[in-house]
Image (spheres, grey):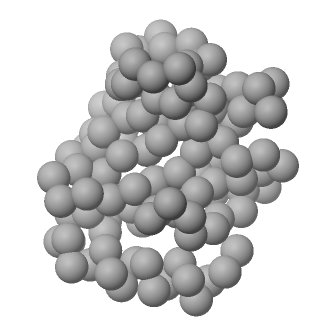
Amino acid sequence: MNAQSIEALLNDLRLLGDEQISLVESVRKLVKKTIPSVTEEVKYGGIVFTSGVMFGGVFAYKQHVSVEFSFGARIPDPHGHLEGGGKGRRHIKLRSTADIKAKSLADYLPLALEAARSGA
């Protein structure tokens, strides 16, 4: 993990507003808690998550934060929160920190890692 690059990105994200930076930090904390072996890297304008394989990332936008899953189309979606209709990727949009729990993000993280490992 290049901490300097991540810190620089986080400083830039502060310009989007307190809610977005808080969401990004909350997602990062949850990912680290759920998948202790995770490493982070700044890529594609966000922070991507890897644990042997890249399985997802968190990206901040003006109106929301998106948690992207590299092989999201392979993830079962029992809660119905995955968005996107592309061939491979899926995402969950977060508009508040309450959405992290309401959209069961913690349930999707191990599924995303498993899908990436089987798809890589």
Q: Residue furthest front?
A: 87
Q: Report the front residue among 89 and 93.
A: 89
Say whether residue 7 is left or right of residue 92: right
Q: Report the front residue among 22 and 13.
A: 13
Say whether residue 30 is left or right of residue 120: left
- Quadrant containing the C terminus in the rendered view: top right
Residue 24 image point, x, y percent: 39, 61
Q: Residue drawn 32% across and 59% down?
A: 60
Q: Residue drawn 40% across and 19% down?
A: 85
Instruction: Please tell me whether residue 10 is drawn above or below residue 19 in the rendered image.
Output: below
Instruction: Please tell me whether residue 35 is drawn above or below residue 93 in the rendered image.
Output: below
Q: Residue drawn 56% across and 64% down?
A: 43
Instruction: Please tell me whether residue 113 is drawn above or below residue 8 in the rendered image.
Output: above
Instruction: Please tell me whether residue 12 is drawn above or below residue 113 in the rendered image.
Output: below
Can residue 95 be seen at all in this image of the molecule?
A: yes
Hey, which quadrant is residue 26 in on the image?
bottom left
Number of disc labels: 0
Q: Report the front residue among 60 and 101.
A: 60
- Quadrant containing the N terminus in the rendered view: bottom right
Residue 71 image point, x, y percent: 62, 29
Q: Residue drawn 78% across and 55% down?
A: 37
Can residue 36 be seen at all in this image of the molecule?
A: no
Say whether residue 61 is left or right of residue 1: left
Say whether residue 49 is left or right of residue 116: left
Residue 107 image point, x, y percent: 54, 29
Residue 58 image point, x, y percent: 46, 54
Hey, which quadrant is residue 72 in on the image?
top right
